[in-house]
Image (spheres, helix red, strand yellow):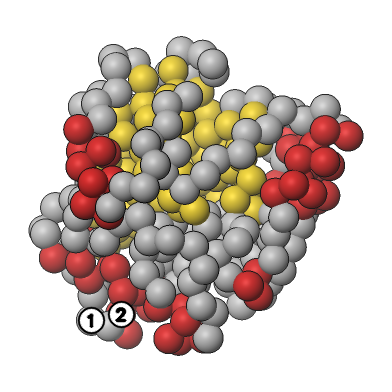
C-alpha cells in the first residue's frame, strides 16, 4: 500500500495523481471518500468511479458535505467517468459539465443518470448508457461487467460493477440492500470488494456489509459510504467488529489513500 502524504492542497493532490505512475502490471486505486475512487494504470489511463467532488447535495436536498474536498473537477482530465446511478453523490451534477467540456472524457451513466444530465443539457456523444448485463472495455487494462444491485424502487437502473484488472477482480457493489441475488459467478470470490455500510436509504449497514463480504468469500473488503453526510450514518469501527467476528479480511482506507494493485495477484 502507498500513502499520499498528509495535508495536500487540492492542486497538490491532483499533481500527486498525475505524477504517480504505476509500475508495469500494476494499477493504483485512490480512495476518494463516500463511494468514490479513481483507478490509474501504467499507460496513464484515468478512470473515475462515483466521484462526489462538490456540495451539490446540500444545495439540492440539505445534505451538507462533512468530509474535505480532495479535488476540483477541472484539476484532472479523466479518460472515463462511471456513475452507478443517478443520485448526486454518485453522479455529481456540479462536476459533470466540467468533466465533459474537455472533449476527451467519456461518461458512462445509467438511465436515471442520463435523465439527470438531460435536465441540464449535458447529453452529447461523450455520454454513454450502461445497464445491468453490459460489458465494457476501458483502456488496455480495465473491463467492466455491470451487475445487479437493489437500491430500491426509486433507482431501478442502479448497477454494481465488476472490474477485471488482469487476474484481479474488483467488485464495486454500488448502493444496495442485502440480496442473495448479489452473489453469483461474476461476484463470488472477488479479490477486492468495495461496499456501502451506511445502513440508510436502502443500503447495507455495518453488520450486513460484513455478512455479505463473508458470503462472497471476498479477498479483502473495503467499507465505503460513511461520514460524508450526517443523515447517512455508517460506522467503520462497527464494521471492523462485525468483520472480525466472521474472519473477514478488510482494509480501511482514508480519503486520498492509494492502494497498489498487482494485476497478477492480490498483495
Query: Disc 2 and disc 1: Cα gap in Å?
Result: 5 Å
Neighbor class of circle 1 (other Cα within 10 Å; few <14, some 14-19, many 20+) is few
The residue that appears at 53% across and 29% down in the rendered structure is 169
Task: State the quadrant of the C terminus.
Answer: top right
Q: Is residue 228 left or right of residue 112?
A: right
The residue that appears at 49% across and 53% down in the rendered structure is 33
| Residue tagged 1 | 121
The residue that appears at 20% across and 67% down in the rendered structure is 98
Which is nearer the eye, 134 or 25?
A: 25
In the image, residue 94 sits, relative to residue 166, either above or below, namely below
Q: Where is residue 87 in the image (x, y as percent from the top left)?
A: 49, 72
The residue that appears at 58% across and 32% down in the rendered structure is 192
**Residue 118, numbered circle:** 2
Q: In this view, does 28 lie to the left or right of 216?
A: left
Q: Is residue 25 visible?
A: yes
Judging from the image, what secondary structure is the residue with disc 1 in? loop
Which is nearer the eye, 3 or 170?
A: 3
**Residue 147, numbered circle:** none
Q: Is residue 260 left or right of residue 251?
A: left
Q: Where is residue 41 in the image (x, y as percent from the top left)?
A: 30, 29
Which is nearer the eye, 210 or 160?
A: 210
Spot the residue most to the left. Answer: 103
Q: Can residue 181 be seen in this view?
A: no
Q: In which quarter of the image is residue 188?
A: top right
In the image, residue 213 sits, relative to residue 206, either above or below, namely above
Q: Does the CB distance between marks 2 and 1 fall below 8 Å?
A: yes
Judging from the image, what secondary structure is the residue with disc 2 in? helix
Q: Where is residue 253 in the image (x, y as percent from the top left)?
A: 55, 40
Amino acid at each position: 500500500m502507498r500513502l499520499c502524504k498528509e495535508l495536500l492542497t487540492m492542486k497538490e493532490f491532483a499533481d500527486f495523481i498525475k505524477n504517480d505512475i504505476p509500475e508495469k502490471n500494476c494499477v493504483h486505486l485512490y480512495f476518494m471518500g463516500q463511494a468514490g475512487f479513481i483507478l490509474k494504470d501504467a499507460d496513464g489511463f484515468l478512470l473515475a468511479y462515483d466521484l462526489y467532488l462538490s456540495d451539490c447535495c446540500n444545495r439540492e436536498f440539505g445534505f451538507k458535505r462533512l468530509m474535505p474536498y480532495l479535488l476540483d473537477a477541472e484539476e484532472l482530465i479523466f479518460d472515463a467517468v462511471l456513475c452507478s446511478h443517478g443520485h448526486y453523490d454518485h453522479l455529481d451534477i456540479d462536476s459533470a459539465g466540467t468533466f465533459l467540456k474537455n472533449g476527451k472524457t467519456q461518461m458512462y451513466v445509467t438511465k436515471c443518470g442520463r435523465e439527470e444530465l438531460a435536465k441540464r443539457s449535458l447529453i452529447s456523444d461523450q455520454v454513454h448508457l450502461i445497464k445491468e448485463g453490459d460489458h465494457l472495455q476501458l483502456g488496455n487494462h480495465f473491463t467492466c461487467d455491470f451487475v445487479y444491485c437493489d437500491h430500491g424502487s426509486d433507482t431501478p437502473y442502479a448497477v454494481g460493477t465488476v472490474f477485471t484488472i488482469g487476474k484481479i477482480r474488483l467488485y464495486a457493489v454500488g448502493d444496495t440492500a442485502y440480496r442473495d441475488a448479489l452473489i453469483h459467478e461474476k461476484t463470488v470470490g472477488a479479490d477486492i470488494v468495495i461496499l456501502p455500510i451506511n445502513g440508510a436509504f436502502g443500503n447495507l449497514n455495518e453488520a450486513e456489509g460484513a455478512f455479505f463480504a463473508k458470503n462472497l468469500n471476498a479477498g479483502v473488503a473495503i467499507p465505503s459510504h460513511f461520514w460524508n453526510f450526517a443523515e447517512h450514518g455508517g460506522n467503520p469501527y462497527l464494521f471492523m467488529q462485525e468483520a472480525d467476528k466472521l474472519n473477514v479480511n478488510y482494509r480501511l482506507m482514508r480519503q486520498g489513500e492509494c492502494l497498489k494493485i498487482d494485476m497478477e495477484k492480490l498483495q
